[in-house]
Image: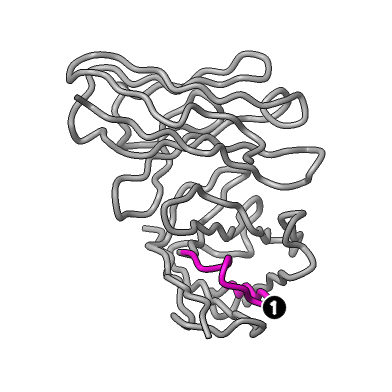
Amino acid sequence: QITLKESGPTLVKPTQTLTLTCTFSGFSLSTSAVGVGWIRQPPGKALEWLALIYWDDDKRYSPSLKSRLTITKDTSKNQVVLTMTNMDPVDTATYYCAHVHGSDMDVWGKGTTVIVSS
Amino acid sequence: QSVLTQPPSVSAAPGQKVTISCSGSSSNIGNNYVAWYQQLPGTAPKLLIYESNKRPSGIPDRFSGSKSGTSATLGITGLQTGDEADYYCETWDSSLSAAVFGGGTQLTVL
């Protein structure tokens, strides 16, 4: 059974860097065609895809946020970390990580809420 | 403004059928598979359809997906009140080299 859980700070101040960790079980990030993606959803708004890292360390980023995002993996710890720099109140959202097989986000974590406020 | 265009809302009576459209372009839907997600209130999205028309294990056959050209459609038959949710289409955009979501469609079962 595949499970994922997001963790990180609930509250960050503007201009700070956000670090989120996705801890997963039930699969290995060293398996071909497997990846972990990050998606966010501001309150009352649509889903927004952020980034994706594959088993071979191939990384993809949202073009609009690429300059602020970094995604890394620790295969031995079964973790994927997403960092987002220069946080702004518009970045307030629920952040999800998801298991990716091929191109499909087939299992999602429950999400973690991040509020950006001074 | 989302890369993929969905109607903001649709509604239908219990037992009826509804379709939700998702319009894109040749750089996304036109040349890539489409996935559909269901997001019940207060919960994480759940994969409903992958590779445009396939259902994951456990998804009832009341849910179906299709794709034609640069558009995709989610169909739901035998509507139930428990189907009330937001539905999102998603695909890869080859020009952006990124995944893209539609703006979401809120389904109301009257």
Is residue A92 found left or right of B62 in the rendered image? right
Looking at the image, which is closer to me, A106 or B37?
B37
Element on which disc 1 rests: loop
Who's the residue at 59% across and 80% down the image?
A19
Left or right for B21, reference B41: right
User: Seen in the image, is A74 located left or right of residue B15?
Assistant: right
Determine the residue positioned at 66% across, 26% down: B24
Residue closest to the eye, A44 or B31: A44
| Residue A89 belongs to the span the image colors magenta | yes
Farthest-out residue, front = A118
Count of labels in the image: 1
Specify start and end residues of the magenta stretch as a single range: A80-93
Q: Identify the residue at image location x=61%, y=19%.
A: B71
Residue that badge 1 annotates:
A86
Label 1 marks a residue whose chain is A
Q: Is residue B27 magenta?
A: no
Of the residues shown, which amino acid type is indicated by label 1? Asn
Q: Position of residue A54 (x, y in %)?
A: 68, 58
Q: How crowded is the residue under tag 1: few (<14 C-alpha within 10 Å), some, or many (20+)?
A: few
